[in-house]
Image: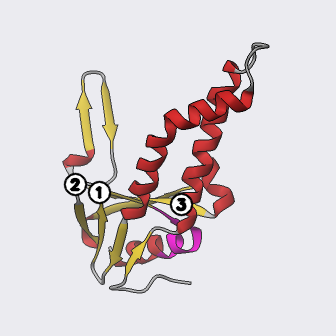
Amino acid sequence: MALELNQRYKLPSVVQFRVFTKFLLVISLISFPFSIPEESNFFEVFLGFSFLGSPFLIYYLLKYHVINFVVNEDKITINKGIVIKRSSSISFDKVQNVETTRRILDTPFKLLLVKIWTASPEQINIKIRKSKHKSAGELLILKEDAKWLKNYITDKK
C-alpha cells in the first residue's frame, strides 16, 4: 500500500506499542540487579520502577501520538509537539539523501526510521571536539510506506 499525496497521516499505532515494549524491557533490565538480594522480590522492584518511570512512558506515548505528516507533490510537512507545536516543510529539491534504518526493536513491528537530509547548516551542531549531525526530518513508519516514501523523494529530486 502506497501513501497517497495530500493526505494527513499519523504514525502507525504499532509505534506506540513499540514504545510500551521498549519501556517494559528497560524497566526489566533496571529492576533485575535490584532484585538479586534475597530480600527483594523482582515483581515488587519492577512495579516500583514502573511507577517511577510512568511519566516518561506517558510522555513518549503522547510524543509519538501527536506526530503527523503530509506528502505533497514537491514537499513533505512533518508536524510534531505536545505543548509546543512545530511544523517543518522539507522541499524535495533540497533533499540530499533519504536514509532508512531498521533498529532492533523496530524489526518485529515491521517499522523503519526514515531520515531526510538536506544541505542545511542547522543539521550540524559543532562543539569543541564533537560534532553532531541531525536530519531535517525523521519518521518512524511501516516498512512498505518507508520504502515508498524513500523512492518517491529520490525520484523527485
User: In the rendered structure, which disc, 3 or 1, sits on the residue that comes first in sequence?
Assistant: 3
Whether residues under marks 2 and 1 lie with C-beta atoms below 8 angstroms apart, the answer is: yes
Residue sitting at x 73%, y 19%: 40
Residues at marks 2 and 1, CA–CA distance in whole angstroms: 5 Å
Q: How is the image coloured?
A: secondary structure
Q: What secondary structure is marked by label 2?
A: loop
The residue nearer to you, when weighing 121 against 8, is 8
Residue sitting at x 24%, y 63%: 88
Residue sitting at x 58%, y 51%: 20
The residue to which callout 1 is attached is: 81
Q: What secondary structure is marked by label 3?
A: helix
Left or right, 112 with reference to 3: right
Please name the amino acid that badge 3 sits on.
Val
Return the x and y of residue 123 as percentages of the image width and height: 26, 47
The residue to which callout 3 is attached is: 15
Left or right, 110 with reference to 115: right
Quadrant assignment, res 118: bottom left
Is residue 108 one of those drawn in magenta? no
Please name the amino acid that badge 2 sits on.
Ile
The residue to which callout 2 is attached is: 84
Return the x and y of residue 19 as percentages of the image width and height: 54, 51
Residue sitting at x 63%, y 43%: 24
Q: Which residues are magenta?
A: 140-148
Bin the neighbour count of mark 2 within 10 Å (Cα to Cα): few under 14, some 14-19, many 20 and up: few
Please name the amino acid that badge 1 sits on.
Gly
Q: Is residue 94 above or below residue 20?
A: below
Left or right, 34 with reference to 125: right
Q: Which mark is residue 32?
A: none
The residue nearer to you, when weighing 4 against 55, is 55
Return the x and y of residue 157 as percentages of the image width and height: 32, 73
